[in-house]
Image: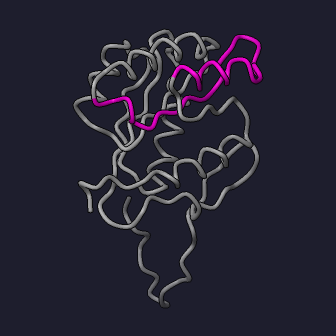
Amino acid sequence: MTPPPRDPAGPAAPVAPAVPTPAGILPVDAGRAPAGRRQTVLVSGLASDSHTWNLVFLQLLIEELGYDVVNLGPCVPDELLVRECRERTPALLVVSSVNGHGHQDGVRVIRKLRAEPGLAELPAVIGGKLGITGGEGTDHVAELMEAGFDSVFEDGAQEIASFRRFIGGIPRRAALS
């Protein structure tokens, strides 16, 4: 991100970056990455989901919070997602789905991820439209959590603030200290 051009009349007061959401504008000060070297967050769609706008939105939001992002894009096969997590060792995996099959695909992929040596403790979250009716409720959330996700964010503007709080609590890896 390049800084704005300097005003010859003098420096302007700094303006905090903001993120537009359906619920309005959220300031980007809470949930920032810890100071020091930037950690990497892996963002991914699921194998059956070809949508990209949600992944781009998440990438921009997470980058504004101070993290580096590797965006694997849509239609990511389970094996590729697991391999990328193993090879990149991200601070967090963020899975997003808006096609209504996030619940089914999410349970399957997180079980594969948790079965992989070295990935059982990787913080992983899922969010979006997780069922075909929307607002699936506690049944899908409970099953996704039991399968191994650390948090579930269903479709909705209030979930963005919850996600920001969650990502702000990611502990720094000892290797970055």
Relative placement, left or right, of 145 versus 62 is right
Nearest the eye: 91 or 43: 91
Residue 36 position, x and y percent, is 32, 66
Scheme of image coloration? one colour
Residues drawn in magenta: 118-147
Nearest the eye: 52 or 172: 172
105 magenta-colored: no
Position of residue 67 relative to residue 55, above or below, is: below
Relative placement, left or right, of 38 versus 43 is left
Q: At 48% from the left edge and 35% from the top edge, which residue is drawn?
A: 56
Nearest the eye: 25 or 166: 166
Residue 177 position, x and y percent, is 26, 63
Position of residue 176 relative to residue 54, above or below, is: below
> Dividing the picture into quarters, in which one does residue 157 lie?
top right
Q: At 55% from the left edge and 29% from the top edge, which residue is drawn?
A: 126
The furthest residue to the bottom:
9
Position of residue 152 relative to residue 35, above or below, is: above
Relative placement, left or right, of 109 versus 147 is left
132 magenta-colored: yes
- Is the N terminus in the top left, top right, bottom left or bottom right quadrant? bottom left
Q: At 60% from the left edge and 52% from the top edge, which residue is drawn?
A: 165
Number of marks in the image? 0
Residue 40 position, x and y percent, is 34, 45
